[in-house]
Image (cartoon, rainbow, N blue to C red):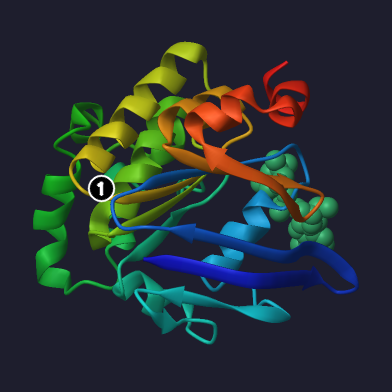
Amino acid sequence: MLNVENVSTYYGQICALDNVSIKVEEKEAVSVIGSNGAGKSTLLKTIIGELRPKNGDIQLSGRSIINEKTFKLVSRGMTLVPEGRHVFPLLSVWDNLLLGGYTIPSRERHQRAEEVTEPFPILRERKDQLAGLLSGGEQQMLAIARAMMTSPRLLLLDEPSMGLSPKLVYEVYEKISDLHLQGTTILLVDQNAEMAIDFCSRGYVLMAGSLVGHGSKSELKESEIVHRSYLG
Ligand SMILES: Nc1ncnc2c1ncn2[C@@H]1O[C@H](COP(=O)(O)OP(=O)(O)OP(=O)(O)O)[C@@H](O)[C@H]1O
Ligand SMILES: [Mg+2]
């Protein structure tokens, strides 16, 4: 479904991704783990077209998307839930959802907002409240529901557990798991390596912009480097 081939991305002279290749098959859940500054967010931003790689190719369902604009990629079934949630704090919960549906016809947006909030009753209860007044976990739920407005087949998640209490982390992962069970393919980045590895069937390890490992869930758990660097 998604094929990232030898991609390098720079910020000016700084190489943030160096010759990275990853694959995600239809219906899979795949993790990318790595510490601060490893290049995880850069990878997701490059995939969704917010950053242009200097070399390499990215294909979605067999077609190169390297020159596609982000909104085109969203219409083609790929959405990013960015790091730090980025809900619009001064807009209502409902208006945040409607904005997430910017690529679908406006007459369908309310109906779709009803559908995506079905697993998130709290968002329905708070639909007219300013999004900035939601708790961290609720904002994360809103960011995920908003990303679902365009019915993505591939959902890119950047640090969904960041800043959340253990209980909320568990709740957020439960929701992501439901979306996965309903058929959404997931590419997940999380500094919480244990959660990410456990959730996904396979994963990649990124260090200072380079891939240093990949494997199945059990291979990652047994890997010396993963243990030493991320699982303590
Ligand atoms: N806009 C930018 N301009 C210059 N350098 C940047 C920019 N964004 C990121 N970088 C650098 O690129 C590298 C990779 O950053 P990135 O945000 O992808 O890391 P990350 O793995 O997502 O880290 P974290 O876990 O802290 O979110 C880092 O060295 C970072 O300082
Ligand atoms: Mg990041």
Name the residue nearer the viewer: 59 or 104: 59
Q: Disc 1 marks which amino acid?
A: Trp
- Residue pictured at 12% horizontal, 46% vertical: 114
Q: Secondary structure at mark 1?
A: helix
Q: Find disc 1 in the rendering and name its residue.
A: 94
Residue 87 at what x, y percent from top left? 45, 47
Residue 205 at what x, y percent from top left? 66, 43
Label 1 environment density (alpha carbons within 10 Å; few <14, some 14–19, many ≥20): many
- Residue pictured at 67% horizontal, 20% vertical: 231
Q: Is residue 227 above or below residue 43?
A: above
Is 77 situated left or right of 116 in this image?
right
Name the residue nearer the viewer: 108 or 89: 108
Is 112 situated left or right of 180 in this image?
left
Residue 206 at what x, y percent from top left? 70, 47
- Residue pictured at 68% horizontal, 44% vertical: 213
Where, quadrant-wise, is the N terminus in this rendering? Answer: bottom left
Is 116 situated left or right of 66 in this image?
left
| Count of numbered labels shown in the rendering | 1
Furthest-bottom residue in this view: 67
Name the residue nearer the viewer: 152 or 137: 152
Furthest-top residue in this view: 167
Is 121 situated left or right of 103 in this image?
left
Residue 21 at what x, y percent from top left? 61, 63
Write down the quadrant of residue 222 in the picture.
top right
Q: Is residue 96 visible?
A: no
Write down the quadrant of residue 73 in the picture.
bottom left
Q: Is residue 80 visible?
A: yes
Where, quadrant-wise, is the C terminus in this rendering? Answer: top right
